[in-house]
Image: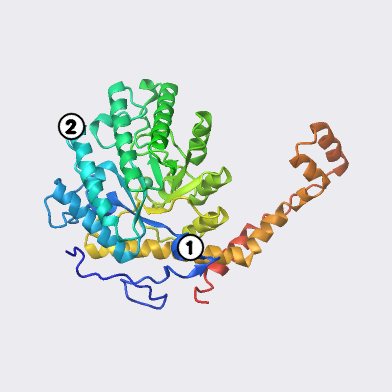
């Protein structure tokens, strides 16, 4: 039975099309830098925003009907969400989905019953996956909604709550492995603090690391070969979250010996909340060999919280794809951790939103590849560091010099040393030039 009856498969029609239910740029088989667009862009549907969230905010209730013809909070509804999700992904040609445990089933009072429901729904999802190309990108445990997690999960002051978190991670890993997930995410939604007056930061961080070690041990023991991810976010819901940004999370992973099993899942809106650009956190992850996956969305410069908007900023998407291409792609994918605006409450809006997001990243890919092929920006960066190509530069890079030697060298320079222009405006003009060249070849 079709849920989105009035909407057919979304075709690629090209930039000149005015059909709102067609891709203008995402042409899955188009080859860019030797790889198909669909391989460059493993898009994923976020179960929570697309199939669960219905517009409730701090000031008002649901605007969208996501009952899919059933009674919410029942297993029938859970299955209807699976049906809706698969129909949605198939119509858009989306290859992956991401989930939290409690996105899949209504949470029961007893964790044993919740786990039984998870077994039932994952059987149903597995059945649905047969005969499609749809796969699981990553799973995670929601350790922030239930009131027991008010003080965090790994960072909680309560050892009983910690055990509950462990139980949820164990089950979420079981389901992720059962569904063939490529990754497993830790987003530390409440792993942080409201006030240092009641918080032992060191104790909490050590406990988070222990929980992650147990997750790695258990995951590997049941055959999970994918990556674990930390998804950094500086704040919201807590005032301060421990996984503030990529640099902080990477330092934490190294400190506790978790860096071989973990990578970053970078979310655009989280990076901007941390006072960075999206590109910054991607670059920091990439240079540390830890750019694993992306939560694709965008924030609003006028709002100081996580608005999770569908990405439409082509500049940002281009800079993102530039980082991804330079990284040689992702082991993960592009999960649309994005939600429709509250007044965009119809089923059609769900499709428009994903078409927008997929087209934005397709454009970003096309343009990032053009920037790389054009070569002016890369050539400039290379030239900018060319003074290091000489003997002295090589010696410094090889750690074969001393302050005394450099001091003697500098004394001979007099006042002659100037680093050369940064040429920012020239480079920005090149960027614009390429961005607005047009996409048809
Ligand atoms: C919240 C957020 C989460 C994670 C998964 O800001 O991004 O949805 O992606 O828990
Ligand atoms: Co996210």
* Colour scheme employed for the rendering of this structure: rainbow
Work out how far the residue at label 2 is from the one at label 1, CA to CA, in angstroms.
46 Å
Q: Is residue 53 visible?
A: no
Q: Is residue 180 visible?
A: yes
Q: To which residue does mark 2 refer?
A: 110
Can you give x and y, in whole percent of width and height, for residue 77 in the image?
A: 16, 51
Tell me the SS state at disc 1: helix
Can you give x and y, in whole percent of width and height, for residue 361 in the image?
A: 44, 61
Residue at 80% across, 35% down: 401
Tell me the SS state at disc 2: loop
Between 324 and 275, the one lying in front of the other is 324
Quarter of image, res 58 = top left
Q: Quadrant of ligand 1?
A: top left
Q: Looking at mark 1, is its residue's CB closer than 8 Å to ligand 2?
A: no
Between 53 and 42, the one lying in front of the other is 42
Q: To which residue does mark 1 refer?
A: 364
Q: Residue furthest left?
A: 71
Q: Is residue 108 above or below residue 93?
A: above
Residue at 51% across, 36% down: 259
Q: In the shown orientation, is residue 419 left or right of residue 293?
A: right
Q: Are marks 2 and 1 in contact (CB under 8 Å)?
A: no
Q: Is residue 104 above or below residue 31?
A: above
Q: In the shown orientation, is residue 83 left or right of residue 180?
A: left
Can you give x and y, in whole percent of width and height, for residue 130 in the image?
A: 29, 57
Residue at 23% across, 32% down: 147
Q: Is residue 170 above or below residue 416?
A: above
Can you give x and y, in whole percent of width and height, for residue 250 in the image?
A: 51, 37
């Amino acid at each position: 039975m079709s849920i989105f009856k009035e909407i057919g498969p979304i075709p690629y029609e090209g930039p000149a099309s005015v059909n709102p239910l067609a891709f203008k740029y995402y042409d899955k088989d188009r080859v860019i830098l030797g790889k198909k667009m669909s391989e460059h862009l493993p898009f994923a549907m976020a179960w929570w925003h697309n199939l669960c969230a219905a517009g409730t905010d701090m000031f008002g209730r649901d605007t969208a009907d996501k009952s899919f013809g059933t009674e919410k909070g029942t297993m029938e509804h859970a299955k209807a969400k699976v049906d809706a999700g698969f129909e949605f992904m198939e119509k858009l040609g989306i290859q992956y989905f991401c989930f939290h445990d409690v996105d899949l089933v209504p949470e029961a009072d007893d964790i044993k019953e919740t786990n039984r429901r998870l077994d039932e729904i994952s059987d149903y999802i597995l059945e649905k996956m047969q005969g499609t190309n749809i796969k699981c990108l990553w799973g995670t445990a929601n350790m922030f909604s239930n009131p027991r997690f008010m003080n965090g999960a790994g960072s909680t002051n309560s050892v009983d709550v910690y055990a509950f978190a462990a139980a949820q991670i164990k089950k979420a890993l079981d389901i992720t492995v059962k569904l063939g997930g490529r990754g497993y995410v830790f987003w530390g939604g409440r792993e942080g603090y409201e006030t240092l007056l009641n918080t032992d930061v060191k104790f909490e961080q050590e406990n988070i690391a222990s929980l992650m070690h147990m997750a790695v041990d258990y995951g590997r023991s049941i055959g999970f070969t994918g990556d674990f991810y930390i998804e950094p976010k500086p704040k919201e819901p807590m005032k301060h979250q421990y996984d503030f940004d990529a640099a902080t999370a990477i330092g934490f992973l190294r400190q506790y010996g978790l860096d071989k099993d973990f990578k970053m899942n970078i979310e655009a809106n989280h990076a901007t909340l941390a006072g960075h650009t999206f590109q910054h956190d991607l670059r920091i992850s990439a240079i540390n060999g830890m750019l694993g996956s992306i939560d694709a969305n965008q924030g609003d410069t006028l709002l100081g919280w996580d608005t999770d908007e569908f990405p439409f900023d082509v500049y940002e998407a281009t800079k993102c794809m530039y980082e991804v291409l330079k990284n040689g792609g992702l082991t993960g994918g592009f999960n649309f951790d994005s939600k429709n605006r509250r007044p965009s409450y119809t089923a059609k809006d769900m499709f428009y939103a994903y078409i927008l997001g997929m087209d934005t990243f397709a454009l970003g890919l096309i343009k990032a590849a053009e920037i790389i092929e054009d070569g002016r920006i890369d050539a400039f960066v290379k030239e900018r560091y060319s003074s290091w190509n000489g003997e002295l530069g090589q010696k410094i890079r090889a750690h074969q010099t001393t302050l005394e030697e450099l001091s003697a060298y500098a004394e001979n320079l007099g006042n002659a040393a100037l680093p050369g222009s940064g040429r920012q405006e020239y480079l920005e003009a090149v960027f614009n030039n390429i961005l607005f060249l047009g996409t048809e070849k």
